[in-house]
Amino acid sequence: MSILVDESTRLVVQGITGREGAFHATRNKAYGTQVVAGVTPGKAGQDVEGIPVFNTVRDAVEQTDANTAMVFVPPRFATDALYEAIDSGVELIACITEGIPAHDMLRVYTHLKRGQQVLVGPNCPGVISPGKATVGIMPTEVFTPGRVGLVSRSGTLTYQISKELADMGIGQSTVVGIGGDPIVGSSFIDVLERFEADPETDLVVMVGEIGGAEEEKAADFIAANMSTPVVAYIAGFEAPPGKQMGHAGAIITGSSGTAQGKKEALEARGVKVGTNPTEVAEIVRGMV
Amino acid sequence: MDLFEYQGKQLFAAHGIPVPSGEVAETPAAAKGAAEGIDGPVVVKAQVQVGGRGKAGGIKLAANPEEAHDRASEILGMDIKGHTVNTVWIESASEIEKEYYASVTLDRGEKKPLVMLSAVGGVDIEEVAASQPEKLARLHVDPLVGLQPHDARWLTFTAGIDPEAMKGVVAILEKLYAAFVATDASLLEINPLILTKGGDVIALDAKVTIDNNALYRHPDIAELQHSVTTDPQERMAHEKGVTYVKLDGDVGILGNGAGLVMSTLDVVALAGGRPANFLDAGGGSKAEEVEAALDVLLSDPKVNALLVNIFGGITRCDEVAQGMITALDRIGATLPIVVRLDGTNQAEGLELLSQKAPSNVVVEQTMLSAAERVVGLAKEVQSA
């Protein structure tokens, strides 16, 4: 097993005729993901490398049984694309788009049919279950099938840690990039809950960073609800307060949200925290 | 993007939130002129984006325009926690009866706006939240419904706002929430919100943070960026579209992806070095972005050595190498540069560097060894 994406994933790509959309839809398909449809308004009837294009997500879902949507639409139009994906009834929406205003995401999240639908992102690299399917922009060669789950707010840091694991012969069940924005569809806890329920995930690596309180909440959740061990990494010890570090979410406000605070919260609940990506992989190797 | 107090007050005024009348000044003479246009005593307030201005002597009362001139000449040029005061705000002095606190923020965990109100204002609100949580009324707002008048009333009753201030506070909360939505703010904070001896409720301070992602639909606010960015490298980075934050060390950092760059800063610090900056060339960095990034980094005289840490995904290592070679050819920098390339097209990138990069560019295989190497090289430069 794995979580969120697998052989049963039937993907519709919103924004498929754009340069990035076409490139990644094709790559996802080449990896083995069932990419069944694309959507670009006004371009129904065309195809991208054999993937049929529809005018609306609803048409795509009706005609291809798509159950997952990937949003590759530029930020000014992405909010509309997200509402469209939600209203089409797909089970999973992965929003890759970077730069969506937070207020738009507040409204999108409130409209999401939670319990029936999962939103991952925005500003995320997507989800991959190695050997089964990938939805997003992750460099697939970094990942190998295995039994370690990984959930992260950062794309490149995910690749870095996965590479370190791969160098030690450790593969992944599923890797989820939840995104670096302040308002994201899935939190650490949402994903940890799924990993806990997955019999083929033996350990979870959680990659956090400064800002917000989601790592601290995850620490409480892990202590109370998880039998699957978790190893964590937190980036941003050197980030000064009040400075925004690229990710819109990675900003320290006040005393909460610091890397040190997050590390202490996790360690207080028995979660091992590596001081650098290599050490994280070494801790994992000692536990699996 | 954080606004200065005076910009925040102008934004408040534009949304119908009462603020004391005032004017900006950059010289003591202008401060005097501003005070002449205001009836009665004025307050001269340093415009810096850091807390504790009052305690640092950055806020002073002046009884007349001559005093405003003298107070402004004391405050202008002052250093408050590393921030130089270039601007003062001259405003009509208020007679304070009571001080309250009001704010609207994005609650990331709840994924809703959070409105907070307290009858205890003018103090560190985090302290109040920690020691007397019952004194801080909090309400999460459904973003699809918005703050309703009954919500605003509930907040004022719960916070224990004085009866004579109720009507004014309710009106301000409604306007504050409307402004929060209209300006795509991540934070609007009034501390203190005051009841004057005359019975008016007005915002005596304004802390405003606007979501950078939404600036495209607020060109008027986006224009203020230039005035709030004073550091030469930060200003250059903004013009070139590079995500850059200056820190106080001497090891320049260039990486791709915010998480990896933050991790790189941490690893450099663990190796005993001090990062000079945060610079994220982007998840899909191309040669031009890398070139622009190097322009920014190499213009900083404090940088003694540079670490380029790239994990290629969408970013291709050969593109990064090409950008570096082009930039170094043009700029001709001689400081030591340590490069670590991994991921997509790593071999091609390393090949390019070995053929065309100048001799001050050295390659390391791992993030940790690269961090140790660059810290050692920076120390050599510093002691040379």
Image (tube, coloured by chain):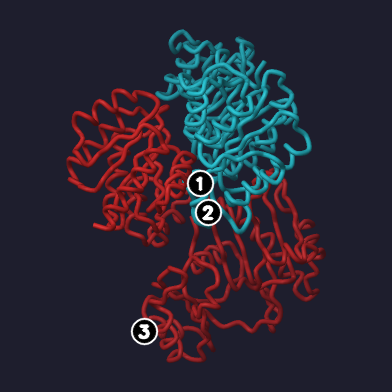
Chain colours: A cyan, B red
Task: For mark 2, give the secondary structure.
Answer: strand
Q: Circle 1 marks a residue in which chain?
A: B
Badge 1: residue crowd in 10 Å (few <14, some 14–19, many ≥20) = many
Q: Nearer the viewer, residue B109 or B204?
A: B109
* Residue underneath mark 2: B210
**How many discs mark residues in the rendered view?**
3
Residue B29 is tagged as 3
Looking at the picture, which amino acid does disc 3 mark? Ala
Tell me if B250 is positioned left or right of A24 in this view: left
Q: Circle 2 marks a residue in which chain?
A: B
Q: Nearer the viewer, residue B307 or B45?
A: B307
* Residue underneath mark 1: B214
Tell me if B176 is positioned left or right of B61 in this view: right
Task: For mark 3, give the secondary structure.
Answer: helix
Q: Nearer the viewer, residue B10 or A37?
A: A37
> Looking at the image, is mark 1 or mark 3 earlier in the sequence?
3
Badge 2: residue crowd in 10 Å (few <14, some 14–19, many ≥20) = many
B123 to A93, vertically: above or below:
below
Residues at circles 1 and 2 in contact by the CB criterion of under 8 Å: yes
B217 to B160, vertically: above or below:
above
Residue beneath the point at 46% across and 39% down? B260
Residue B383 on image: x %, y %: 27, 58
> Looking at the image, is mark 2 or mark 3 earlier in the sequence?
3
Which quadrant: the C terminus of chain B?
A: bottom left
Residue beneath the point at 51% across and 40% down? A276
Looking at the picture, which amino acid does disc 2 mark? Ile
Residue A228 is tagged as none
